[in-house]
Amino acid sequence: MNIPLTSHPRVVIIGGGFAGLSLAKKLARQELQVVLLDRHNYHTFQPLLYQVSTGGLEPDSIAYPIRKVLKDFPNFFFRLANVETIEPEAKTILTDIGSLKYDHLVIATGSKTNFFGNASIKANSMVMKTIPQSLNLRSLILQNFEQALLKSDLNERNALMNFVIVGAGPTGVELAGALAEIKKGILPKDYPDLDIRQMQINLVQASDRVLPAMSEVSSRKAEIFLERLGVDVWKDVRVTNYDGETVTTETDLCFKTATLIWTAGVEGATIKGVDSKELLVKGNRIRVDRFNQVEGLENIYAIGDIAWMEEEKFPHGHPMMAQPAIQQGKHLGENLIRLTNGKKMKPFSYHDKGSMATVGRNKAVVDLPRFRFQGVFAWFVWMFVHLFFLIGFRNRVVVFINWVYNYIRFDREARLIIRPYKKKEVAEAAEVKNV
Ligand SMILES: Cc1cc2nc3c(=O)[nH]c(=O)nc-3n(C[C@H](O)[C@H](O)[C@H](O)COP(=O)(O)OP(=O)(O)OC[C@H]3O[C@@H](n4cnc5c(N)ncnc54)[C@H](O)[C@@H]3O)c2cc1C
């Protein structure tokens, strides 16, 4: 890998997401050699992926080069690599570009889509965890309308204009809201010769409310917002199968659709070597102690979505969100510095700052630890928070300008089929990388 040997202990971090980057920044300029590996050379701001999928933002504005984040730190090395195996006994990792020894290893690989073992849904649905996946979805949505225009068979045309989103967590809700906005403001202008009123957006949820991780009042309000936008919300409905044409459920309900978008769950993105049953808990997350140390493995830590840490207030682990990942990354950084200075590590405690989701123009719901609010003010708070946490000054400016432009003009100009979506090629590539 062409990493020089030094007298400083080597910390290897797998994953340049929220957790991995906040840890790497903390370790900069320390008496440590820091090697960060990621299969992408950029950090992805996942909370805005849905805007890329629906043409509201260009992908570049929510991605940031990892090398640039850490360019001024002499002890930092980045390598573009897919980590395939960890060998704890040999203190070595194996990747597609070679192997590397570590003194401390930090697993910050985040999560991947969980299909709960359903092969038909995995094979036929669209997902949205990475920028390439969001671009696939953007292309497919637009390709569907181009095709619908050419269909004389009404059933085929309607199936192309029927979008089924499974999972009404923040991702499903935000995507449904954005699709409804496009239906209202953009598609009738782009496709005057198609009856866009036939477009359907179905949001299907297995439990009895949307946004189940938020307060009841926010759930109720979000559902009202969605219905006002024309989204059909189906609760207490569990999807069982999708063969590429028909979605079946445990009830009598079924949908004829060319597009099923699966946002119903995630699981830890584990790596061979630390994926044994003893190390993992529900959702394939790695059990760690309060110091983020993987239980039973020396000098191996896990942070962010992949880590399952139980606290009194969080007996089922921390939520798989950006804040726990950022806070754990920073905290582990402080602990590793303490360790190299011969001091004791301090236990981690999650500071819950709340959660929020937007449903569309002027509509959002916010749950803070002490306050809850919904509507226009919540929408402004949502925008401010997302701009604040977006990495890179240029990205913040570009996103802000885009939002102002889209708001004033009721527009989303990135509705481009740059790279047409080809299902077979994409499925094969995903299989190789295990994403
Ligand atoms: C569509 C969507 C919307 C979201 N919205 C919100 C929101 O509004 N608010 C919120 O708080 N959270 C949101 N989340 C969740 C949030 O993005 C995650 O909790 C957060 O990204 C977790 O950070 P992480 O560092 O653990 O993992 P990630 O940010 O996922 O980073 C993991 C990194 O590891 C790399 N990687 C994985 N495996 C390997 C490997 N084998 N080899 C090399 N590199 C590897 C990946 O390429 C990636 O860069 C959303 C997530 C999604 C998908």
Image: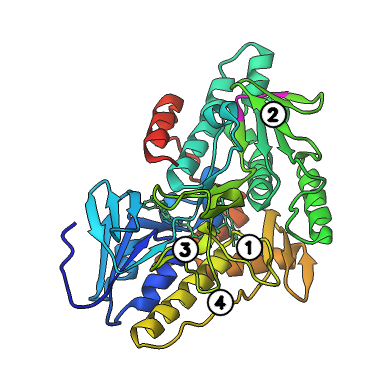
Which label sits in the foreground, 3 or 1? 3
Contact between labelled residues 3 and 2, with CB atoms less than 8 Å apart: no
- Crowding around mark 2 (Cα neighbors within 10 Å: few <14, some 14 to 19, many 20+) is some
Residue designated by label 3: 296
Contact between labelled residues 4 and 2, with CB atoms less than 8 Å apart: no
Q: Is residue 349 magenta?
A: no
Three-letter amino acid code of the residue under disc 1: Gly
Report whether 404 appears left or right of 255.
left
Q: Nearer the viewer, residue 377 or 85?
A: 85
- Crowding around mark 4 (Cα neighbors within 10 Å: few <14, some 14 to 19, many 20+) is some
Residue designated by label 4: 348
- What element does badge 3 sit on? loop
- What element does badge 1 sit on? loop
Report whether 165 appears left or right of 64.
right
Residue 221, picture quadrant: bottom right
For marks 1 and 2, give the CA distance.
28 Å
Contact between labelled residues 4 and 1, with CB atoms less than 8 Å apart: no
Q: Earlier in the sequence, mark 1 or mark 4?
A: 1
At horizontal 40% and vertical 85% (from top left) the residue drawn is 338
Residue 300, picture quadrant: bottom left
Q: Earlier in the sequence, mark 3 or mark 4?
A: 3
Q: Earlier in the sequence, mark 2 or mark 3?
A: 2
- What element does badge 2 sit on? strand
Residue designated by label 1: 317
Three-letter amino acid code of the residue under disc 4: Phe
Q: Earlier in the sequence, mark 3 or mark 1?
A: 3
Which label sits in the foreground, 2 or 4? 4
Residue designated by label 2: 240
Q: Nearer the viewer, residue 95 or 154?
A: 95
Which label sits in the foreground, 1 or 2? 1
Three-letter amino acid code of the residue under disc 2: Thr
